[in-house]
Image (cartoon, helix red, strand yellow):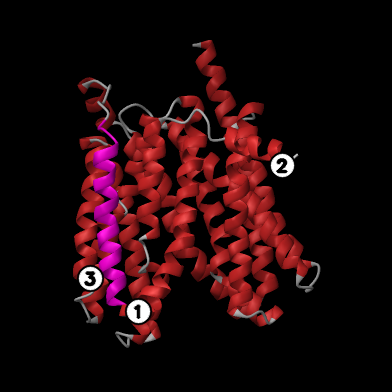
Amino acid sequence: MYRAVITSYTSSFRGLSKDVWYLALVTLVNRAGTMVLPFLTKYLKEDLTFTYSQVGWVMVAFGLGSLIGSYLGGKLTDLFGFYKVMVGSLLISGFMFFGLQQITTFWGFCLGILLLMSVADMFRPAMFVSLKAYSKPENQTRSLTLVRLAINLGFSLGPALGGIIIVSVGYAGLFWIDGATCILSILMFVMLVKEKNNTETVIEKRTAKQLSIYKTDRPYFIFLTVSFLMGVVFFQLFTTMPLYHHDVHSLSEWQTGLLLSLNGLLIFLLEMPLVHQLEKQKISQIKIIMWSLCFYGLSYAVLLFTNLDFILVVSVFAISFGEMLGFPYTNAFAMKRAKSGMEGKYLALYTMSFSFAHILSAKIGMSVVEKYGYTTNWVLMILLSILAIGLTALLSKKLALENSNQVQA
């Protein structure tokens, strides 16, 4: 039985291109090195003695930089290709991490983190476009899942390593390690992965530059709204949920950490085999996205029925399955939907939808909890999930009509 389970698990990784494996390795190194981010608020408060209000504004600058970076990354990818954008983004942001530790004033740090994230997050849309180039169409969802696996593993290792570095050499060590891993990961990428020639013609590129996605692909904006709502609901896991653990269930930081680690463990063990099995079934991406939203809503609905601690585990299981179905397939839909010569724009808008959600999710959740309590916030998240399900159904109808018109044409 154990051998069958292991065989089933390993088979889900077969058939992926060598370049995708290299990209996952580079992403693992880069994400494991991103140690400043989990400790950023603590560094600002304790080392730079910023006020809570100032820390909040720095995080706003962080989010705005992420939005700008996603937008620029998409534009530059369409102009110069994903390879050059990925190399330039990580190389420059690596050196910017070195310089950020020298900034100690409030306004200086706001500007520094805004510029850093504007450069660093150019990487994301370019990386998604690279997956479309380096993987076969039938393997794109699994290729994306492999890279997500590397991201999750890297984020799991990063905070633990960061804690050791802080104890050993202080916060300054984090900036040096972050910068060095950005540079190291992109040097690995250049050595291991060759730039893929763009097969699109100059005419296609010129035509793409003149097109507006809103005018040519309005269903995609319904999809972006669904992605935004999904992000708002999901990011509650890292914002209001830890406070709920403490205030309502009296859990310690260690116990909350275990619950969040359970989420990461489930993703690590189950996401790739689950995606592999769904690909075999050839179920539509829209239907799977709808399932994921049902799991998101369920993860908050179970919290309404009891305050027993075990329900927190049930909630984590539900939101983890929502994540395993939602993120790979929304990303795969964006990649598949992207028109020739406009891949950067499409993937930039996709990443920006989650950047917006990241900024607004915490603010919405905290405000609702402060004024009306946790139960009201969970009801709001359920309603947002239902709204997203309705929009997904509308998107499905729009796509069916679009396919029908294409067949008739």
Q: In the shown orientation, is residue 302 left or right of residue 102?
A: right
Question: Label 3 amino acid?
Answer: Leu
Q: Please name the amino acid that badge 1 sits on.
A: Ser
**Residue 241 pos. (x, y %):** 61, 70
Label 3 or label 2, whichever lies nearer to me, is: 2
Q: Is residue 190 magenta?
A: yes
Q: Which residue is mark 2?
A: 2
Q: Which residue is mark 3?
A: 100
Q: Quadrant of the N terminus?
A: top right
Mark 1 near mark 3, Cβ–Cβ under 8 Å?
Answer: no
Secondary structure, mark 2, is helix
Q: From the top left corner, tell me how far across and down residue 66 is, in percent.
A: 34, 58
First to last magenta residue range? 171-195
Look at label 2 and name its amino acid. Tyr
Q: Nearer the viewer, residue 407 or 240?
A: 240
The residues bearing labels 2 and 1 have C-alpha atoms spaced at a distance of 41 Å
Which residue in the protein does label 1 denote? 168
